[in-house]
Image (cartoon, rainbow, N blue to C red):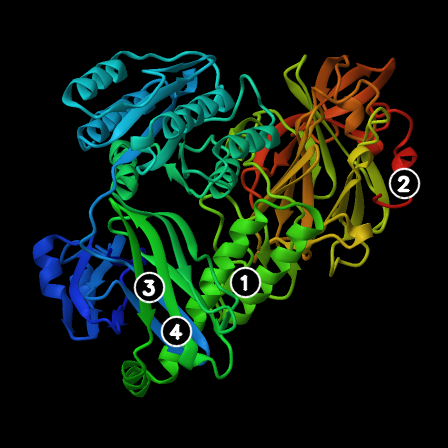
């Protein structure tokens, strides 16, 4: 077991006073201390990084001058771009170490010199078509290396799942040289096979392990392990996630751990994590990169050498409370078990820890006691710092367990656990998926202070705490699909409304764009989209331009949008300041500083910090709201919103509104092009909806990719509030409120 401290170093500039100063204090004594800077050649790192350790204390100092940061003597670019990693280990003379301070305890259990347990391991591998190419190649390479690390006393089998499920042997076989060679040949030859029958693959692996434990007594004392690798979501067989979780739980029944490996970014990692947590295991993402083979092998090495199984750390019931997890299915070589809790008043004298487990060929039992003299000495040395450390370690472990627990809950139970985790995160000032940290004294070009978030793995945070408000959602969500939410893939054509308000209507049949303005007073609410078949609607309220010039037309802009889907009781209010979910029922409030996504039944909302938000309705449309901030030199003196239609082909044919009426095909003809009253612009005659209009060729802007400057769009401009193009007159679209 060793401890790593990793600091991401990316200043992106030369820094006048740059310093990393690490102080380490370990009561057990430091055995080794290493430092690595990925951005420095070894020779230069040896010159610039000072490290030392003696007894319980260690120290690392990295303080490069500006010239030492430069990529070359005359360069203004920096070498500092990568990871600064401090690695150390402690003396482990005893099987366990107990720290006690201020009525809290921390118990570290890492016994040495134990015999390795033989193991029963089944690898369940996804061979669906999405594994094609590099992923399949790297999986096979990793399996070859893992098979090479099997010990003669181990037993194993391989299960493959695509549309169908197949196993190599269908039962556990010993890791003999002949069997290992046959397994390598099987791995080399298997190929991809259709969809993803994840449920079937897991149940086959569970069946193989259960059958071995029941029918082969000599294997019952082995450490059984199930490892599953997938890169996607279930698309064959049982696809309901709740049913899959139940099937796996009922199959394993706590007998052995399940470790899930999610390959790439298309997997539902939350689903895999819940499944692992329910079955004494854990999940790990394998990133699609050149080192994916090493990532797979590295994970296996963490569980390759079990030393103990069914580990229990027991404490006197009357002496302790608020224990963190103290029962573990297995203990592996190179790992460490940590337990923390509170000690009742006046119970220190009776406090101890009894550890029981099954080892190779024998029962493992030991008792850990507090060395009171050593603790007094430590407290004299470190005082409040040590007391604070033990209590914060208990809080950290407790928060992590609450976050894991809440993933398996729903409704009020989930809300209660979330509230407790949030309260502790704030009280102990931990950045978690429930909280954010605002960096004071720094602002970006928009005058906003940086916020540090801790997302779940590399998902966007579902629950966040801003500088003033707490935001909580009711359910964990899957990642957004790229097809509906990837803003980098915006359609080239544009339909939407922006600035003063200029409406842009793309007409795909003509490969052209029409445009018109609506001139109304601040405070007026306009219907933009209304689908009578589903009730889905988008309404926008106009605001005025502050500090307008007397006698001139006062520009109006959308300052408030209401997006509603009554079928699912969904409402979203958007202003340049906040985004509020279900405002009528006191829903969560997000600011534009937040990065988040959430799902409520059929509606998925993605907030892209300080830029835009996307609303996607299943079997409906996808829409984008663009945030416009006041900037120096801007003619507009007030923040406002733009609204764009990204996809509307699934909206009903009866959809209406100033934008909605144009979601389905219509025809027009343009003729008689001639110079207009402005000689720099062309006028023409347009026949549309049996009306003859005079239109003008002009320019408007699409602000989706660049909210500040926009991209020019050529269009035919319809005068007089769109008269003749829109159904009825523009005042027909005035509604009482945004909902």
- Determine the CA span between mark 3 and mark 1: 46 Å
Quadrant housing residue 643 = top right
Residue nearest the viewer, comparing 559 with 357: 357
Task: Using a 10 Å C-alpha cutoff, classify the residue at mark 3 as few (fewer than 14 neighbours), some (14 to 19) or many (20 or more).
Answer: some
Question: Foreground mark, 4 or 1?
Answer: 4
Q: Is residue 315 above or below residue 161?
A: below
Instruction: From the image, tell me which residue sits under label 2.
Output: 735
Foreground tag (3 vs 4): 3
Q: Residue at x 37, y 32 (%)?
A: 227
Q: Dots 3 and 4: beta carbons under 8 Å?
A: no
Identify the mark at residue 108; answer none if there is no mark: 3
How many residues crowd mark 1 within 10 Å: few (<14), some (14–19), many (20+)?
A: few
Does residue 508 appear left or right of residue 255 in this picture? right
Relative vertical location of residue 468 with respect to residue 566 in this rendering, above or below? below
The kind of secondary structure element at disc 2 is strand
Instruction: Determine contact: label 2, label 4, CB under 8 Å.
Output: no
Q: Which residue is mark 1?
A: 447
Element marked by disc 1: loop
Q: CA distance from mark 1 to mark 2?
A: 35 Å
Crowd class of label 2 (few under 14; some 14 to 19; many from 20; radius 10 Å): some
Q: Earlier in the sequence, mark 3 or mark 4?
A: 3
Q: Mark 4: few, some, or many residues within 10 Å (few <14, many ≥20)? A: some
Q: Is residue 557 left or right of residue 56?
A: right
| Point 39% across, 23% down: residue | 208
Measure how far apart labels 3 and 4 are at the Cα level.
Answer: 14 Å
Q: Residue 647, can we see it?
A: yes
Q: Secondary structure at mark 3?
A: strand
Location of mark 4 (residue)? 389
């Amino acid at each position: 077991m060793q401890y790593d401290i990793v600091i991401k170093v990316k200043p992106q500039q030369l820094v006048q006073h740059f310093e990393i100063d690490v102080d380490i204090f370990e009561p057990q004594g430091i055995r080794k201390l290493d430092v690595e800077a990925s951005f420095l050649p070894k020779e230069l790192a040896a010159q610039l990084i000072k490290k030392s350790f003696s007894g319980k204390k260690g120290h690392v100092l990295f303080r490069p001058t500006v010239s030492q940061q430069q990529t070359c003597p005359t360069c203004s670019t920096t070498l500092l771009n990568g990871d600064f990693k401090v690695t150390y280990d402690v003396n482990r003379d005893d099987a366990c170490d107990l720290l006690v301070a201020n009525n809290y305890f921390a118990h570290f259990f890492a016994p040495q010199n134990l015999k390795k347990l033989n193991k029963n391991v089944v690898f369940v591998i996804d061979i669906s078509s999405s594994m094609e190419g590099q992923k399949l190649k790297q999986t096979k390479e990793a399996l070859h290396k893992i098979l090479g690390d099997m010990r003669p006393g181990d037993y194993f089998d391989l299960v493959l799942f695509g549309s169908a499920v197949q196993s190599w042997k269908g039962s556990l076989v010993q890791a003999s040289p002949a069997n290992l060679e046959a397994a390598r040949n099987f791995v080399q030859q298997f190929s991809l096979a259709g969809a993803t029958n994840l449920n079937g693959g897991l149940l086959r692996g569970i069946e193989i392990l259960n059958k071995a434990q029941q029918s082969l007594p000599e294997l019952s004392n082995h450490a059984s392990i199930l490892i599953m690798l997938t890169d996607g979501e279930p698309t064959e067989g049982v696809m309901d996630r709740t049913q899959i979780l139940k099937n796996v739980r009922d199959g394993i029944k706590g007998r052995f751990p399940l470790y899930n490996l999610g390959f790439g970014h298309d997997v539902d990692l939350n689903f895999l994590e819940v499944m692992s947590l329910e079955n004494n295991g854990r999940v790990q993402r394998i990133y699609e990169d050149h080192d994916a083979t090493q990532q797979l092998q590295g994970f296996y090495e963490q569980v390759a050498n079990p030393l103990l199984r069914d580990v229990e750390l027991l404490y006197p019931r009357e002496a302790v409370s608020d224990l963190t997890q103290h029962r573990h299915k297995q203990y592996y070589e190179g790992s460490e078990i940590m337990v923390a809790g509170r000690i009742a008043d006046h119970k220190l004298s009776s406090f101890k820890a009894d550890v029981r487990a099954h080892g190779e060929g024998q029962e493992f039992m030991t008792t850990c006691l507090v060395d009171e003299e050593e603790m007094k000495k430590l407290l004299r040395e470190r005082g409040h710092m040590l007391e604070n450390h033990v209590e914060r370690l208990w809080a950290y472990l407790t928060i992590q367990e609450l976050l894991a627990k809440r993933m398996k809950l729903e409704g009020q139970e989930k809300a209660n656990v979330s509230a407790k985790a949030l309260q502790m995160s704030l009280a102990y000032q931990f950045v978690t998926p429930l909280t954010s940290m605002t960096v004071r004294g720094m602002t970006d070009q928009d005058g906003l202070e940086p916020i540090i978030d801790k997302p779940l793995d590399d998902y966007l945070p579902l629950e966040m705490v801003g500088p003033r408000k707490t935001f909580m959602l009711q359910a964990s969500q899957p990642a957004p699909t790229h097809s509906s939410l990837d803003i980098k893939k915006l359609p080239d054509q544009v339909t939407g409304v922006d600035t003063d308000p200029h409406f842009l209507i793309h007409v795909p049949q003509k490969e052209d764009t029409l445009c018109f303005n609506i001139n109304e007073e601040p405070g007026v609410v306009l219907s933009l989209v209304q689908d009578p078949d589903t009730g889905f609607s988008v309404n926008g309220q106009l605001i005025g331009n502050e500090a307008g010039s007397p006698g001139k037309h006062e520009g109006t802009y959308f300052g408030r949008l209401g997006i509603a889907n009554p079928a699912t009781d969904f409402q979203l209010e958007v202003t340049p300041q906040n985004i509020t979910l279900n405002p009528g029922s006191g829903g969560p409030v997000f600011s534009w500083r937040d990065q988040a996504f959430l799902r409520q039944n059929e509606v998925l909302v993605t907030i892209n910090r300080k830029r835009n938000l996307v609303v996607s309705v299943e079997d409906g449309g996808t829409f984008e709201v663009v945030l416009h901030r006041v900037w120096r030199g801007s003619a507009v003196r007030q923040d406002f919103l733009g609204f764009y239609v990204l996809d509307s082909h699934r909206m009903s044919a009866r959809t209406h509104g100033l934008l909605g009426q144009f979601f389905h095909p219509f025809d027009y003809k343009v003729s008689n092009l001639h110079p207009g009253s402005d000689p720099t612009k062309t006028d023409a005659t347009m026949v549309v909806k049996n009306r003859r209009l005079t239109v003008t060729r002009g320019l408007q802007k699409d602000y989706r990719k660049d909210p500040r400057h926009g991209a020019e769009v050529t269009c035919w401009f319809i005068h007089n509030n769109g008269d003749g193009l829109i159904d009825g007159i523009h005042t027909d679209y005035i509604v009482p409120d945004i909902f």
